[in-house]
Image: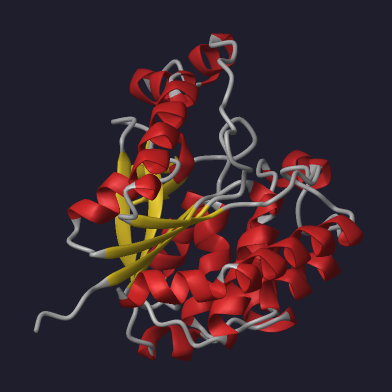
């Protein structure tokens, strides 16, 4: 009998990712096993905590530091060129203030993939990470969550990268193409959400040296909406299992209010518990 392979796919969305954190903690507490995790943007940044088995860490450190000017916001943008402070977010927090368990990350069996967008090609790359103590691997993780317009490109191996969500917001087709039989998809927008077309002027100006990336930014709404149609179709066919917020909570991408962050996390926990048996049934059938 061939054993089924299962993947966990995590959408981004900045601090809407508190919902994802709640879902992950329910899965960890219920000892739901997966063979791979693929995270996009905040989905990658927060998703490492599933592999490190650190339930509660995401909501804990974000509530504690979201309002700290060293963490993210205009102060960081003006002083470092990045809306998220590189040293504080990717050194101080995970290494000292609320340590990530890098040994556990390296030793747990799940494959982990972070999605990034290459500025030169405008295409997504799906980078396998297995040791976050390696500088390039942490840089790929940082790149996945580096928002365009308010982040400097992350340079790795001579290539420049930014937010993975630009080229592939919810790479369900990619994960299915990798041979996974069961896919749990965690979205951070309620059912029926669609993106609206934006003004292309800013991307065309700021990324004029990277026309493929500018095109990817400007067409993101179109790809996202088409992708949403595919996800809904696959969900109806029961080929994937989708978890999404059961109600709308107004959460800013860079939300600083700890009560709002807790509310979004609690919704993830609630939705995860409500649909836990359904998820288990999907994985077993």
Q: Can you give x and y, in whole percent of width and height, for residue 89 in the image?
A: 66, 63
State the residue at coordinates (46%, 35%): 166
User: Looking at this view, is 192 or 164 the one in front?
Assistant: 192
Vertical order, 265 against 142 (above or below): below
- Where residue 79 sits, quadrant-wise, is top right
Q: In this view, does 90 lie to the left or right of 162?
A: right
- Where residue 118 sits, quadrant-wise, is top left
Q: Specify the quadrant that holds the C terminus.
A: bottom left
Q: Can you give x and y, in whole percent of width and height, for residue 141 in the image?
A: 47, 60
State the residue at coordinates (17%, 61%): 179
- Where residue 135 sits, quadrant-wise, is bottom left
Q: Is residue 23 left or right of residue 2?
A: right
Q: Can you give x and y, in whole percent of width and height, for residue 84 in the image?
A: 68, 51
State the residue at coordinates (28%, 45%): 173
Q: Can you give x and y, in whole percent of width and height, for residue 65 in the image?
A: 82, 65
State the residue at coordinates (30%, 55%): 239
Q: Would residue 158 be seen by someone viewing this image from the given angle? A: no
């Amino acid at each position: 009998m061939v054993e089924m392979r299962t993947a966990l796919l995590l959408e981004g969305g900045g601090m809407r990712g508190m919902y994802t954190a709640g879902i992950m903690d329910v899965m960890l507490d219920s000892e739901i096993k997966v063979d791979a995790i693929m995270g996009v943007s905040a989905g990658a940044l927060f998703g490492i905590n599933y592999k490190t088995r650190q339930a509660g860490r995401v909501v804990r450190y974000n509530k504690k530091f979201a309002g700290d000017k060293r963490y993210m916001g205009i102060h960081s943008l003006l002083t470092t060129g990045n809306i998220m402070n590189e040293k504080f977010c990717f050194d101080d927090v995970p290494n000292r203030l609320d340590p990530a368990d890098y040994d556990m990350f390296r030793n747990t069996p799940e494959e982990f993939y972070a999605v990034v967008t290459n500025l030169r090609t405008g295409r997504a790359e799906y980078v396998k990470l297995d040791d976050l103590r390696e500088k390039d691997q942490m840089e790929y993780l940082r790149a996945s969550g580096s928002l365009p317009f308010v982040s400097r490109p992350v340079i790795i191996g001579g290539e420049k990268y930014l937010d993975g969500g630009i080229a592939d917001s919810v790479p369900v087709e990619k994960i299915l193409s990798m041979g996974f039989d069961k896919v749990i998809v965690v979205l951070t927008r309620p059912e029926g959400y669609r993106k609206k077309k934006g003004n292309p002027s800013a991307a065309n100006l700021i990324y004029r040296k990277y026309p493929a990336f500018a095109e990817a930014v400007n067409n993101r709404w179109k790809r996202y909406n088409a992708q949403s149609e595919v996800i809904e179709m696959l969900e109806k066919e029961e080929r994937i299992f989708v978890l999404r917020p059961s109600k709308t909570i107004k959460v800013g991408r860079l939300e600083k209010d700890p009560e709002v962050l807790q509310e979004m996390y609690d919704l993830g926990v609630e939705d995860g518990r409500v649909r836990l048996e359904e998820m288990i049934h999907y994985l077993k059938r």
